[in-house]
Amino acid sequence: MVRKKTKSRRSTNSPRKSGRHSNASNKESYDPKVYEVQITTLKKKTKEYQYVIDSLKDLNSQLSLQFEKDGLEGEGLIGYIQNCIQHKDQDISELKENLSALCSRMNEKQLEHNNIVAKLRFEIEAVEEKLNSEKAVLRLTGERINSNHSSNSLNIPHTTNHI
């Protein structure tokens, strides 16, 4: 009889499975600092791209003035620069969309976190109330037992057998 070779069943994280696991862990370990770092990075990239766009626009206007002054045709270079500006504008738009989505996710996670904390606080208060109630019942029961014990000890005559 020939045995089939079986693949080892190592726990590799396929994209399908890892998404579920990472979402579960993300809910448990919400860290706003992670989002803040990502937001800061996106804002920094946006500023860098905006600086490039502004520089290209400035260069474009300088070249246009120079070409007009010299009477030269610089349409190819100017077109290239304008194309670069459009691409960087698109990059900035994408970064802003990513930033907006990231802020939304951060707000959702913060709201989830706040809801979990509120629920836990409510549960803690309920447990405290229950424990206080049980404590009061035990105290009353203890007092009754003590009062019954002390009243019984008064009513029981002590008899001693003398031999």
Image: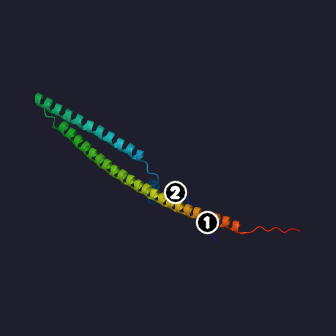
Q: Mark 1 falls on what kind of element?
A: helix
Horizontal side of residue 28 vs 79, given as left or right = right
Task: Answer with the quarter of the image where residue 70 lies.
Answer: top left
The spot of residue 112 in percent (x, y) is: 40, 56
Please give the name of the residue rendered at 38% of the width and 54% of the height, measured from the top-left corner: 111
Image quadrant occupied by the C terminus: bottom right
Viewer-side residue, 106 vs 112: 112
Which residue is more in the foreground, 155 or 6?
155
Judging depth in this view, the residue of 30 and 18 nearest the camera is 30
Question: Quarter holding the N terminus?
Answer: bottom right
- Secondary structure type for disc 2: loop
Residue at the image position 54 percent from the left and 60 percent from the top: 131
Are the residues at dot 1 and dot 2 in contact (C-beta closer than 8 Å)?
Answer: no
Q: Residues within 10 Å of mark 1 (few under 14, many from 20)?
A: few
Mark 1 / mark 2, whichever is N-terminal: 2
Residue at (14, 29) in percent of width and height: 66
Q: Residue furthest bottom?
A: 1
Q: Which residue is mark 2?
A: 12
Q: Residues within 10 Å of mark 2 (few under 14, many from 20)?
A: few
Q: Amino acid at mark 2?
A: Thr
Q: Is residue 118 visible?
A: yes
Q: Please say if 56 is above or below 119.
A: above
**What residue is disc 1 on?**
144
* Quarter assignment of residue 64: top left
